[in-house]
Each structure stands twice: as C-alpha cells, then as structure tokens.
Image (cartoon, coloured by chain):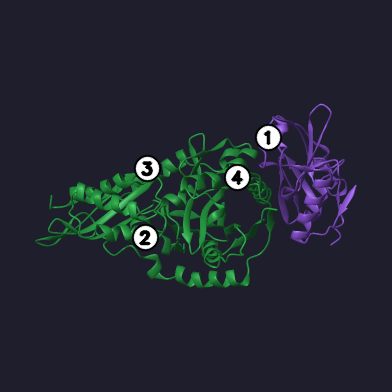
Chain colours: A green, B purple
Amino acid sequence: MTAPIRILDLGLVSPLRSQAIYHGVAYAQKPETPDTIILVGPTDPYVCIGYHQELEREVDVDYCREHGLPIFRREVGGGAVYLDRGQVFTQWIFHRPNLPASLEERFALYIKPLVDTYQTLGIPANYRPINDIHVQGKKIGGTGAAQMGEAEVVVGSLMFDFNFDLMARVLKVSSEKMRDKIHQSLNEYMTTMTRQLGRTPDYETVKREYVRQVVDALGRPAEYSDPTPEELAVTEELEKRFASDEWLYQKGGLRQTGAVKIHADVYLAEAAYKAPGGLIRATARLREGRIDDLTLSGDFTMLPSVAVGALEQSLRGAALDAAAVRAKVAEFYRNLPVQSPGVGVEDWVSAVMAIKGQSPLQ
Amino acid sequence: MATCNNCNIPEDLYYWVEKHTWCRREPDGTLVVGVTDVAQHLAKSIISATPKEAGKTVKKGKSAGTVESGKWVGPVTAPVNGTITEVNATLKTQPSLLNSDPYGEGWFIKLKPDNWEADSADLVTGEAGIAAYQKFLDEQGIDCSK
C-alpha cells in the first residue's frame, strides 16, 4: 500500500509558530518521516515577508511596531503579506522523490486539491500558472516553494477571508495615493471564500474536504497525527532565529535610494525590474564601470535558496554591460541546478542593466 | 470465501492487491468496484464515503473517490480506465456498510470499462489472486483479527 501522508491539523497557534512549524518539520525530516501536510492558522495577525525580500523596502516597519504586528521572514520566496485567522495555511513537507522535480509541475500538483476544494464549495476556481489560483480573474491566494534540508516544501492557504485594509496598510509605499491604489487593486483583483459565498464556510468542513481532495489528487491515503517531540524541538530552535533582527533585516546591506556617489569612481545604484515570476530589485556598488558588489532581492521564487547569493557572487567583477552580464548569468544557469519559474536569464540581465539607467556612470 | 490472515478474500473477484481494490464483472460488462476486507480493517470505522460522480471518467490507478474514518482518509483506486455509471448512494447515509459488507452492500461504484481485456491483465483473481493477497499480507504483517 502506498505510504500514508501524515496530516498535522494544528488548529490555531502563535503567529511565530504558524511560520516556524513547517520549517521545523522540514529540517527535522528523516528518511522514515512520512510526507506531511500541516493545516494551521495564527491566533493573532502578523506580517510575513519573502525569503529574498528586503524588509524595510517592502514593509512599513514603524506602523507594524506601533500596532503590535510582529514581522517574520520565511524561508520561502514570494511577497510580503498580512496574515490572520482568515487563512488556514496548507504546508506540504515532502521527500524529494515524492514530488515532481519541475517546480511548475510541483505547483500544479499542490494547487489541484486547493482548486478542487473551492470548486466543491461552488467557487469556480482554477489553476493559473505558474503558482496562482484564480476565480474569474481574481486571485484567491498564492503559493510558494522551497528546499529546506532534505525536504521539499510547498506552502499556500485556504483563503477563508482576508483583511484588504490592513494588507494595504502594512506595505511600504511611496505615497498615500499609491496606498489607495494598492487597496483598490487588492479589492478588485483578490477574492476570498467569504466574498465568493457571501458567508464564511465552516473551517472544519473545508479542511476535511481539502484532505479528501489531497487523497484524491495524490492517490495516497492520509492519516491524522501529531508532530514528534524532535520536530517541535527543531521548531522551537528556529523560532529563536525567526525572532532575531539579524534574520529579519538580512538582505539590507547595500540599501540605498537612486544613485549615490561615494567617490569619483564608486557609485551605489539601484533599480527594479518586473519579471513574469516576480519583482527583482537590484542594488549595486559600481567601481569604474564594473559591478563591485550586488544585492538581488524581491518576491520571486528561486531554488535552492542559496542560489540568489551564488548569482550575486558570480556577477561581482563583471562589466555593467548586457553581453557581459548575460554571459555570467547564462553560465550560472548552465552550471547549477537552479529553478526560478517566470524568471530567466534575460530577466536578470534586464534587472541588472536597469541599474545603468540609474547610474551617473552611463 | 477464502480467508487470508483472517481477512475475507473471495476467489471470484479481481484484485489490485497493493491498492486493496476489488472488482466484479457483471454479465453486461459493467464492473462493480469496492474496497477489500483488508482495506476496511485498516481504515477501522468508516464514517464517510465520497465516490466521484456518475458520468465521470476515471483512470486506472487513480482515485475514484475516498473513504474516511476518524483519523484516516483513503483513496478508492480505479482498477481500469472507464466511466462511472453508478455510485452506491446508500453509502452516504450508511458508510459503515463498507466495514460490515465490503463485497456486497458496501460496493463503491459501477464502471463501464474502456478496455477490460487490456486493462485487467495485471489484476489477479481465483487461486492466483488469493496467493498474491496472502503473500502481500504476510509481507506487510497484516492480520484482520488484530
């Protein structure tokens, strides 16, 4: 018989635990650990940022502090998001051979039971490649993927409800006019089960239906169980790191605005470029027309997690010239088993070369 | 009816042993499909059965619906490619029939197979079926009295 998937239905836990738990289960994974799906929600609201994002660029940290909203960085790509009891997170922690190797296929498999659950409720949801779920053109939650230790992780949520006001409020924006536009866009282009049905469906019924759809999609049985003491111990260790400023503020090393001259031959410059798979922010220190140092951040997904750092490293010393950057990035993709859905060589080239437009060196 | 490790395994049915699915061919070519006594024993008290709807096509080896006990949800695997012609509506109100009578009143769906001859080649039946199930139960250490 095909090995059962373990279901950990944890109900409501602290905001920190709701993020740390899937990291903990992943890092504690052993060969005999069953493939696991965690269903969990936070007792209180919080803000969660993507692994490759720069905190202060994306989130209004002062607002969150003043309003007691904790902020955590997850080890999964994607964007900053306000989270609360309106979502039940569906966190998959699987062994590598038990999921498709291609990230696109993995997202499609992960999303199928979510879509089928929504459809059972009468919500005409469908899979929108690469990793979104849409209802008549509106997004009902996104998904993310990561590798943690030996484990493959895919995360998303059952979107019961969503606080559009606070989502727009916690983001860092250039002006209040921009915030209004974000709020309006969220309202127009996002939806929830509550909005679709005109009522909030019963959480337990929907969770049960979701597990049924998982079993149906994967053709494997599922068994409700509990985390092991070791998984909880690893989770608690990770919670210490997640609560530290060092972890939260990483990626901020080169943070500056526009182009700043350091001395005659050295400038800091930054630019943003929207690739199909997400926003890429590139911040560089340029020395005599070459990339002296580089930070790449944003809400894209790139696996393995160390790949972004490796790409930054590989571009150091390169001339700020499209052909030179392209050669380096192409070489990087040739030599490493990197997956970055919706972000290809030309997107990195465009992001890095956009710096040139900002730079007094041009 | 044959008994393997205290599990009932009728000789006249076709089995996909690892999936714990049985099927029986009716004179008109329709297949009656269900879960075996072994499956119901492993699942314990079944509280819900959710077959896919009549009219839906199913693929061999893929789920044709699910059965649930308190702590367990399992797929009912389609033994061949085909179209669901009927689901056992009684299971909605009496899912425990899957426990009490898995080969009779607890049948799960009826299927019109696309190509029975080709798709059934790896299903086992008769003495060979019993032997295959006995071997599997011994390997897995499954006994329906425990």
Q: Residue at x 47, y 56 (%)?
A: A146
Residue annotated with mark 3: A276
Mark 4: amino acid: Pro
Which chain contains the residue that carries disc 2?
A
User: Marks 4 and 3: in contact by CB < 8 Å?
Assistant: no
Residue annotated with mark 2: A55
Report how far apart the C-alphas of labels 3 and 4 lie in the structure.
25 Å
Left or right for A354, reference B125:
left
Q: For mark 1, does the 10 Å Cα neighbourhood hold few (<14), some (14 to 19), or many (20 or more) residues?
A: many
Left or right for B128, reference A314:
right
For this orientation, the residue located farthest to the right is B1
Mark 1: amino acid: Asn
Report how far apart the C-alphas of labels 4 and 2 lie in the structure.
32 Å
Residue A139 visible somewhere in the drawing:
yes
Residue annotated with mark 4: A113
Report how far apart the C-alphas of labels 1 and 3 lie in the structure.
38 Å
Which SS class for mark 3? loop
Left or right for A17, reference A320:
right
Q: Position of residue A258 (x, y in %)?
A: 21, 54
